[in-house]
Structure formats: C-alpha cells, structure tokens
Image: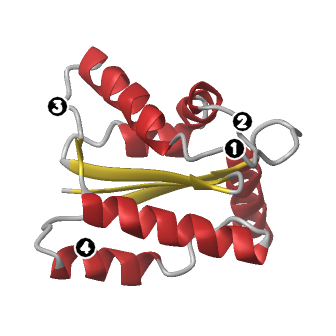
Amino acid sequence: MKILNIMAVAVLVSGCAGTAQPIAMTGDFGPQTLTLINSYRTSHGLSPLVANGTLKALARQHSREQAARGAIGHDGFRQRSAQAKAAGLSGVCTENVGVRYRSAQALFSGWRNSAGHNTNMLRPNMRYAGVSVVGGYSTFFACG
C-alpha cells in the first residue's frame, strides 16, 4: 500500500510539470491564467473567482519558494490557508502548482488535463483566487 501511495504522489507531481520545456523566465502570466480559469468556470455554470490581493501574494510567495528550491510541491499549504483565514477569507482553500509552462494557455491546459488540478479549478465553493508565476514556477491559490 505504501508503494501505491508513493506512486500516486509521483504521478500527481509529474502531472504538474507539463512538457519538457525550458523554464520560462518571462513575466508573471498569472492574471491571464486566472482569466482562462474564470472563463472555464463560467462555461461550467460556476461563478468566476474574484482576484484577491492576499491570495495573489500568497501564490507569489509560494512560487518564489518553489523557484528557490528548484522543485514544486505544496509545502506550507496549511500555513497559507491560515494566513488567508486571518485575512478574513473563510472556508476551505485549494492549490495547484506547476513548472515549465511557457504561457497562460499552456498552464491552464495542463491543469485542465489533470483530474486533480481540474477538480480544484472547478470547486463550486471557491470564491477568491490568486495565480502567480515566478521563474517558471506556478501557483494557483483559491479560497471560499
């Protein structure tokens, strides 16, 4: 069972990485990615997510930390959720990460084509979000 859990984590993490492309050193296309996520949500009868400065800052901080480590992951998710709650956001939070995506469309498509990431983008109880890309490392952070 432990081996299956390790394999499941490896599959999930590999799904975040996208295709083998050089890491983009271009600007932050997080806002464009959020626009694509919102179009996708509305096409499924869901409310768009409201861009939130606190969640954008938390997403940017996590993307920076991933870039500094040179690895993606969800380290610190509980702390980010607690910070969002302390800022007045209630409910649960969710997060997607990714690396090596070169555009908002590629990042959105990667998440849409991954079952777990797709579920996070379409969670009906999410109301606010922030998306940030730093040095090719991406974070989508949304809360209710």
How far, Cα to Cα, is label 1 from label 2? 8 Å
Q: Amino acid at mark 1?
A: Thr
Mark 1 or 2, which is nearer the eye? 1
Residue 33 in the figure: left or right of residue 53? right
The mark closer to the camera, 3 or 2, is: 2
> Do the CB atoms of the residues marked 2 and 4 lie less than 8 Å apart?
no
Residue 139 in the image, given as x and y percentages of width and height: 52, 56
Q: CA distance from mark 2 to mark 4?
A: 28 Å
Residue 95 screen position, x and y as percent: 44, 58
Please give the residue where the numbered disc 4 appears in the rendered image. 84
Task: Look at the image and tell me whether residue 63 can be seen.
Answer: yes
Which of the two labelled residues, at mark 3 and mark 1, occupies the earlier sequence position? Answer: 1
Question: Which one is nearer the viewer's eye here, 87 or 143?
Answer: 87
CA separation in Å, label 3 and label 1: 30 Å
Disc 2 target residue: 102
Position of 31 with respect to 111 (left or right) is left
| Mark 3 or mark 2: whose residue is earlier in sequence | 3
* Amino acid type shown at disc 3: Ser
To which residue does mark 1 refer? 26
Q: How many marks?
A: 4
**Residue tagged by mark 3?**
47
Q: CA distance from mark 1 to mark 4?
A: 28 Å
Between disc 1 and disc 4, whose residue precedes?
1
Dot 2: few (<14), some (14–19), or many (≥20) neighbours within 10 Å? some
Identify the residue at image location x=52%, y=45%: 116
Residue 7 location (% of width, % of height): 78, 61
Mark 1 vs 4: CB contact within 8 A: no
